[in-house]
Amino acid sequence: MASGVMRSLDFYNNILIMKVFVINGPNLNMLGLRKPALYGTGNFAALQDFIRSAAAEFGIEVELFQSNHEGAIVDAIQGAYGCFDAILINPAAYTHTSVAILDALKAVALPCVEVHLTDISTREKFRQFSFVSLYAEHTVCGQGFEGYRQGLLYLKEKYAAQ
Ligand code: DQA
C-alpha cells in the first residue's frame, strides 16, 4: 500500500477497509441521454448503482463525486488527500485538456486508475491523448460500466490489505 493511506476500520470484523474516491467528470451526469449508441443506455444513477455494487462485491468503501467544473474536480482531488487510499477517475472531456487535474493528482500522489466508457484510442484524434494517463498507473477503456468494476478490482488486487 502506498504511504499516507487512510483505511477505515470495520469494528465488527476488525479489518481495514480500502477507501476509493470515484470521480466522474463533465457530461457523465447526462448518461442515458447522451449518445446512447456510444455511451450506452444506462443513466448516471445506474452507473452509480453499478459502482456501489462492484465496490460492495470487493469489500471496498467508495465515495462518488461528479462535477461539470474543472476547478471543482481539482478541489475534490485535493480534498482526497489523507481521506482515501486511491482515486478512480473518469475525467471525461478534461482527460484531453486538463493540466490542472493532472497536477492535482500528482500533488496528492494517491494510487490512481483512469476509466473511460469508450475506447478513446480509436476515437477522434483529439481524444487520443490523455493528460491523466501521464499520472494514472492503470487505464481501462472501452468496457462501458464494467470498466469501473475492472478499475476497482485492479486497486483491490494491488493495494488492499497486505
Ligand atoms: C469519456 C471519453 C471522453 O473523450 C469524453 O469527453 C467523455 C467520456 C469516456 O468515458 O469514454 O465525456 O471519458
Image (tube, rainbow, N blue to C red):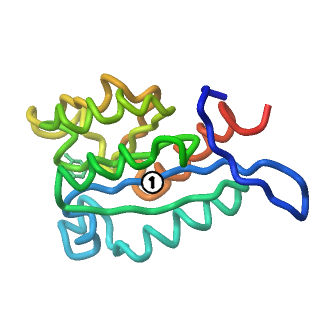
**Residue at left offset 26%, top offset 30%:** 103
151 vs 136: above or below: below
Residue 111 image point, x, y percent: 51, 32
Of residue 73 and residue 53, the one placed in the foreground of this image is 73
- Looking at the rendered image, the quarter that the N terminus falls into is top right
Of residue 40 and residue 129, the one placed in the foreground of this image is 129
Position of residue 65 in the picture relative to residue 5 (left or right): left
Position of residue 60 in the picture relative to residue 78 (left or right): right
120 vs 83: above or below: above
Residue 35: quadrant of the picture: bottom left
82 vs 117: above or below: above
Residue 31 image point, x, y percent: 27, 69
138 vs 93: above or below: above
- What's under tag 1, amino acid-wise? Val
- Mark 1 lies on a secondary structure that is strand
**Residue at left offset 40%, top offset 49%:** 79
**Residue at left offset 38%, top offset 54%:** 23
Q: How many marks?
A: 1
Residue 14: quadrant of the picture: bottom right
What residue would you read off at disc 1? 22
- Looking at the rendered image, the quarter that the C terminus falls into is top right
